[in-house]
Image (cartoon, grey):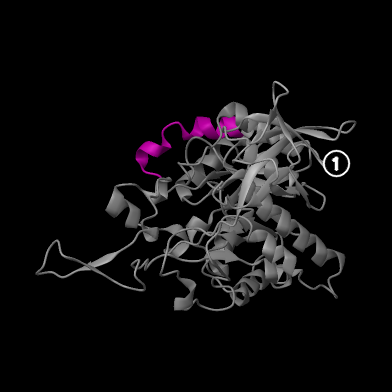
Amino acid sequence: MKKVELLAPAGNLEKLKMAIMYGADAVYIGGEAYGLRASAGNFGWEDMKEGVEFAHSRGKKVYLTMNIIPHNSDLDGMPEYIGSVSELGVDAVIVSDPGVYSIVKEVAPEMEIHLSTQANNTNWKSAEFWYKHGVKRIVLARELSLEEIREIREKIPENLELEIFVHGAMCISYSGRCLLSSYMAGRDSNKGHCAHPCRWKYYLMEEKRPGEFIPVYENERGTFIFNSKDLCMIEHIPNIINAGVISLKIEGRMKSSYYVATIVRAYRQAIDAFYENQAGYKFNPALLDEVCKASHREYTTGFYFGKPSGNEQIYHTSSYIREYDFVGMVLSYDKATGIAKIEQRNRMFVGDEIEVVRPQRPYFNQKIRWMKNEEGEEIESAPHPQMILYMPMEEEVEEFTMLRKKADDGK
């Protein structure tokens, strides 16, 4: 059995590197045009070139999102853009629109094409249609059950790949085809500018009493009637793999480097454990604890085991659950002295208990015994954003190692 691909989001160059170092087999990125995450950092040409080289040097792949639903003006310059992307060595482009697909085929006929979830592929006949037109992979709609996915797999050509989302935010609308943001905020979600009005608080207004807003109570804080839980399938890796998919996708190009690394690391361990002992595989509950250490909403299995009920929505808040802070990242480590050079990402103090999370090895706990600034002066805290500091490590670490601690206790 060929091992499934673990596909991670990369909103910028640092996130790309973190995803790969923490176990992703491939990443998907957005350029500065044509993707559906306009607010992500995204990639200019130099960063894209460096990212592709970084990935390829480690045997990993890079896919580029071009999955907007374009208007006429969006097609201007697209052939030149695709030509440049092809020269950089991007492994595939992800598209949803037949016009964009046509331009890719004309300009870069050898380029691998993946059909985005935005194309709402929910049946085997549609998948077969796209395969006949040269699509290599279908990113299936999130609204499918595992049973439906198995049926699609059975009825399509063997070399047509299937990709599904396994973790991250869910959209209230069919595979993200939503007009709510355009209507309420003038921001087109299908061109990468979603304002996420599904996460807003709503009130009721009676026709003959304009301006009198009546709370729709779920509790005293109001209600969030469109606010879905986050998808999490880490407990169900065998079910997913046995459905016949080739790629497991994590959502989140706008999420932090810490989020990407934490989620990728947990899924990497779950997938590897399954392949090491398929007959005797048992899920390790510690991995669910691990994905809960990244900022998240309450979790759901989405549509995979049947249509969601009302319990798949969060009615009392749109806030994330955040139990841990990402406080620093190791830039380098001196084995002779045991001292690490660290870039601060959140406040930390001498005496704090931290978890030290390494890319390919188990994490360990330690106390911050002392810290020094770049001038070699001892400091009690690291309050300045991205300041450089030094501290001793109780075990060997490496570049990209993350430091985290329980969420700020008010120091």
Q: Position of residue 159 (x, y in %)?
A: 71, 59
Q: Disc 1 residue type?
A: Glu
Q: Residue at x 67, y 72 (%)?
A: 154
Residue 39 seen in the figure: yes
**Left or right for 18, reference 323:** right
Magenta residue check for 305: no
Q: How many marks?
A: 1
Q: Which residue is mark 1?
A: 396
Q: Is residue 253 above or below residue 32?
A: below
Image: magenta residue range: 70-85
Q: Position of residue 193 (x, y in %)?
A: 40, 45
Q: Foreground: 395 or 410? A: 410
Q: Residue at x 50, y 33 (%)?
A: 79
Q: Is residue 349 above or below residue 200?
A: above
Q: Residue at x 54, y 73 (%)?
A: 303
Q: Position of residue 231 (x, y in %)?
A: 56, 65
Q: Is residue 112 above or below residue 377?
A: below
